[in-house]
Amino acid sequence: MNASKILQQLMQQAGSSQKGSGSGSSGVDVQGILSGLSQQLGGGSNQGSSSTGGFDVKSLLGGGAMGMLVGSKRGRSMGGKALKYGAIAGVGVLAWKAWQSSQAAKNSNGQPGNAQANAAEGERVDVLSGDVQERRSLELLQAMIMAARADGHIDEQEQALITEQIDALGADQEMHHWVEQQLKAPLDAQALAREADSPQAAREMYLISVAVTDDQNPMERAWLDQLASALNLPKEMTTELERQAEQAG
């Protein structure tokens, strides 16, 4: 499969769309976030510098099938509260920042944990490579699809359109079938959580789920709560992740 290619393009296009539209809760420059946070946290994410491949960002994340995936067909604004472009674009660095913030809060000196503790948390998706990157990408795509389906509003025709949109991003045949399966599989927070390969992966899975849900919708809020429990994320961590998502816009 080529899940990492698909996820990277979605992240890049989310960043371009959020930056270009100036929408979101805070009008944050996502590319600036990625660059600045990567320098602060160590390690170089280069995802922000890549080309978007000539795709129509507004079509992909607005009126197209991916727009339906995140709920625009229900009248939600793609740049507003429901879809958080910045959180999708910067899922790795923002989830890691949430971890550092939580560690700093626990330490009397206000500094993040030591290098050994940080290493045990796992790497960010944007610095992974090879098979590990592919696995994490699948985890995040699966989390995104399940979160978008949480209110049960995606019918068979819309599923077909979503699959076509993923194909337009260059999905191979195996990826195509995987997406079809994910759009029809039972929603199972425990099964999804078992796919997390590290604490950082768990945070990223929750954060990207927050990015495509509306926490004011009872069914979607319930899904986030189920996922947080399945991922063993404490309340203070989910609160911080949701704060990061809101600030990123």
Image (cartoon, helix red, strand yellow):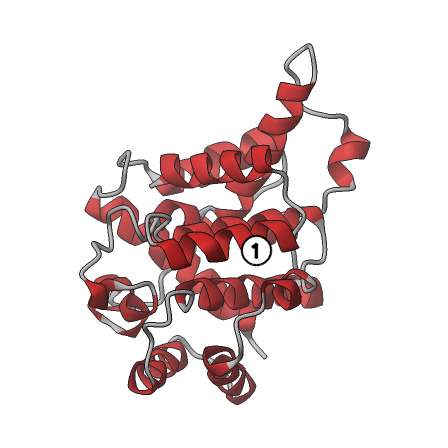
Q: Which residue is at 43% across, 79% downward?
A: 170
Quadrant of the frame with the C terminus: top left
- Residue 37 against residue 112 in the figure, above or below: below
Q: Position of residue 202 (x, y in %)?
A: 63, 51
Per the image, the residue denoted by label 1 is 227
Quadrant of the frame with the N terminus: bottom right
The local secondary structure at tag 1 comes to helix
Q: Amino acid at mark 1?
A: Leu
Disc 1 crowd rating (10 Å Cα; few below 14, some 14-19, many 20+) is: many
- Residue 129 against residue 211 in the figure, above or below: below
Depth check, front residue: 221 or 32: 221
Going by the image, does 128 lie left or right of 149?
A: right
Q: Quadrant of residue 70?
A: bottom left
Q: Position of residue 233 (x, y in %)?
A: 63, 44
- The answer to whether residue 32 is seen in the rendering is yes
Q: Which residue is at 77% across, 26% downward?
A: 114
Q: Position of residue 132 (x, y in %)?
A: 70, 63
Q: Position of residue 47 (x, y in %)?
A: 48, 52
Q: Quadrant of residue 67?
A: bottom left
Q: Which residue is at 58% across, 49% downward?
A: 228
Count of marks overlaid on the render: 1
Depth check, front residue: 97 or 29: 97
Q: Residue furthest right?
A: 116
- The answer to whether residue 46 is seen in the rendering is no
Q: Which residue is at 35% across, 58% downward?
A: 13
Going by the image, does 247 lie left or right of 235?
A: left
- Residue 103 against residue 122 in the figure, above or below: above
Depth check, front residue: 96 or 232: 232
